[in-house]
Image (spheres, rainbow, N blue to C red):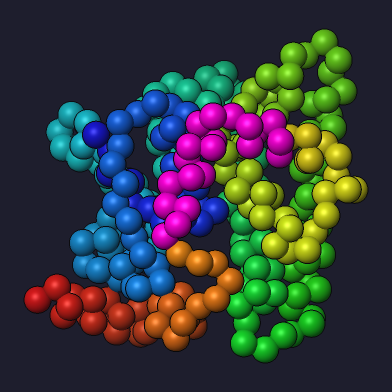
Amino acid sequence: MIDLHYWPTPNGWKVSIMLEECGLDYEVRPVNIGRGDQFAPEFLAISPNNRMPAIVDHDVPGGPVSVFESGAILIYLAEKTGQFMPADVRGRFDCLQWLFWQVAGLGPMAGQLGHFKNYAEERIDYAVDRYASEYNRLLGVLDRCLADRALDKHAPDSHKFMAGDYSIADMATWPWVRAHDGYDQSLDEFPHVARWLDAVGTRPAVARGFAIGADWWTRGSLDEEARRNLFGQTSGRVDELASQAADGDD
């Protein structure tokens, strides 16, 4: 059994989708990031970066294994099951380079765009324009990648994903592209991305993973407590919030 420490966000969906795709037994452990669950001592013990998702795999010889960071979790589950990451050297690193492209580029840029566009208390045009431009650029990178896959007329549709076959790279990227409307970014100039977005989104396991916790919170409006727990964190502020969470458990 795997414990999935989760909240319904793009990074959380990556892992819930992967677990559904792999058919592994897992139990969801909600981490309400608006209420500060990410600072609880028992969560920090498995995710010292005070971010979800994280997993604890109890089905491991020698005792449970915990993994934090969504990209690392996807690699762990792919290696555990032998699914959704090629075994050959070229295929493996084609998949991994696109996974790291997402975790180092698309996710952070989209996250910053979403923050300055939807949550910042005052609009800063330079910040919005800077991250909107970068999000657009990265969609262009993805569109060219998928266009190259589509050029192979002899390849079946199952080989027209980011790394050829459907893989953890697609699972990591899909939630951040699915949110394009919330960033006021049309896909009209990215037809290959639009095709791919639909192809991934219609997979039954993706729909199941995406649906977990769909009614847990209302996006777009945050109260004062949620803003305190999500934004403006420094090292000292995290220590303070963790201390408060520990005191609340007494």
- Give the percent coordinates (x, y) of residue 203: 59, 29
Residue 218 placement, left or right of 51:
right
Give the quadrant of the N terminus: top left
Which of the two residues, 129 or 23, is positioned nearer the viewer here? 23
Reply yes or no: does residue 101 show up in magenta.
no
Question: Based on the displayed image, in which of its 4 quarters is residue 198 positioned?
Answer: top right
Residue 107 placement, left or right of 151:
left
Relative to 242, is 110 above or below? above
Reply yes or no: does residue 210 show up in magenta.
yes
- Residue 96 appears anywhere in the view: no
- Give the percent coordinates (x, y) of residue 9: 50, 56
Residue 112 placement, left or right of 32:
right
Question: Based on the displayed image, in which of its 4 quarters is residue 195 positioned?
Answer: top right
Give the quadrant of the C terminus: bottom left
Which residue lies most toward the bottom here?
122
Question: Based on the displayed image, in which of its 4 quarters is residue 201 positioned?
Answer: top right
- Give the percent coordinates (x, y) of residue 194: 79, 40
Residue 193 placement, left or right of 120:
right
Residue extent of the magenta highlight: 197-216
